[in-house]
């Protein structure tokens, strides 16, 4: 079956190139293969070509016709793999949780949690007015509905 063969070829090329990892993989009923990868140090065009060649050169179009697209995860795409948090430490994230949304700097990440830090304006403990306070929160990755890197132009 085409999906099994592509899965094996994909696993092999990612095993040989440990800094790359899979974000999404699908095959439509008309054999359009779409693979989205990311990397611990980002993804270069050469990385996409490497994965594409590893798959395309090991499939026979005489057996089964197919189209193949290999792409990198877009900058505006949501984070879906815990490894993506690690590579984005130091960047600003927008994180949607069941009860609220937080925008803050990603200061730490493991496979289970992330730590965000941000400044917030809160009422003064005594008297009128507001004061800026530094906030820090550890969030379980399993609690995150969606997380994206905030792009500044």
Image (cartoon, rainbow, N blue to C red):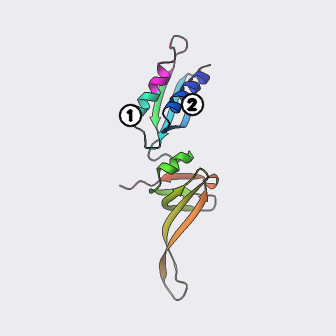
The answer to whether residue 54 is magenta is yes
Q: Name the residue under label 2.
A: 26
Q: In which quarter of the image is the C terminus?
A: bottom left
> How many residues crowd mark 1 within 10 Å: few (<14), some (14–19), many (20+)?
few
Q: Note whether 150 is above or below 6 in the view shown.
A: below
Report the span colored magenta. Answer: 52-66
Kindly identify the residue that appears in the image at 63 percent across and 58 percent down: 98
Residue 66 point in image, percent of width and height: 51, 20
Kindly identify the residue that appears in the image at 49 percent across and 45 percent down: 77
Label 1's element?
helix
Label 2's element?
strand
Toward the top, the furthest residue is 62
Identify which residue, 23 or 41, lies in the foreground. Answer: 41
> How many residues crowd mark 2 within 10 Å: few (<14), some (14–19), many (20+)?
some
Res 45 label: 1
Residue 92 point in image, percent of width and height: 46, 58
Kindly identify the residue that appears in the image at 44 percent across and 23 percent down: 53
Which marked residue is nearer to the observer: mark 2 or mark 1? Answer: 1
Indicate left or right for 128 with 153 as reference: right
Toward the bottom, the furthest residue is 127
Q: Note whether 140 is above or below 6 in the view shown.
A: below
Q: Quadrant of the N terminus?
A: top right
The answer to whether residue 37 is magenta is no
Residue 33 point in image, percent of width and height: 52, 26
């Amino acid at each position: 079956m085409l999906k099994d063969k592509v899965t094996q070829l994909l696993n092999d090329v990612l095993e040989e190139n440990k800094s790359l990892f899979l974000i999404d993989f699908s095959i439509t009923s008309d054999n359009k293969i779409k693979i989205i990868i990311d990397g611990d140090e980002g993804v270069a065009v050469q990385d996409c070509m490497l994965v594409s060649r590893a798959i395309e050169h090991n499939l026979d179009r005489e057996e089964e016709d197919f189209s193949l697209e290999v792409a990198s995860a877009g900058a505006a795409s949501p984070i879906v793999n815990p490894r993506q948090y690690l590579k984005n430490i130091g960047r600003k994230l927008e994180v949607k949780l069941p009860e609220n949304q937080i925008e803050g700097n990603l200061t730490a990440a493991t496979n289970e949690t992330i730590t965000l830090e941000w400044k917030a304006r809160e009422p003064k403990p005594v008297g009128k007015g507001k004061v800026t306070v530094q906030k820090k929160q550890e969030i379980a990755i399993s609690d995150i509905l969606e997380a994206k890197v905030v792009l500044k132009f």
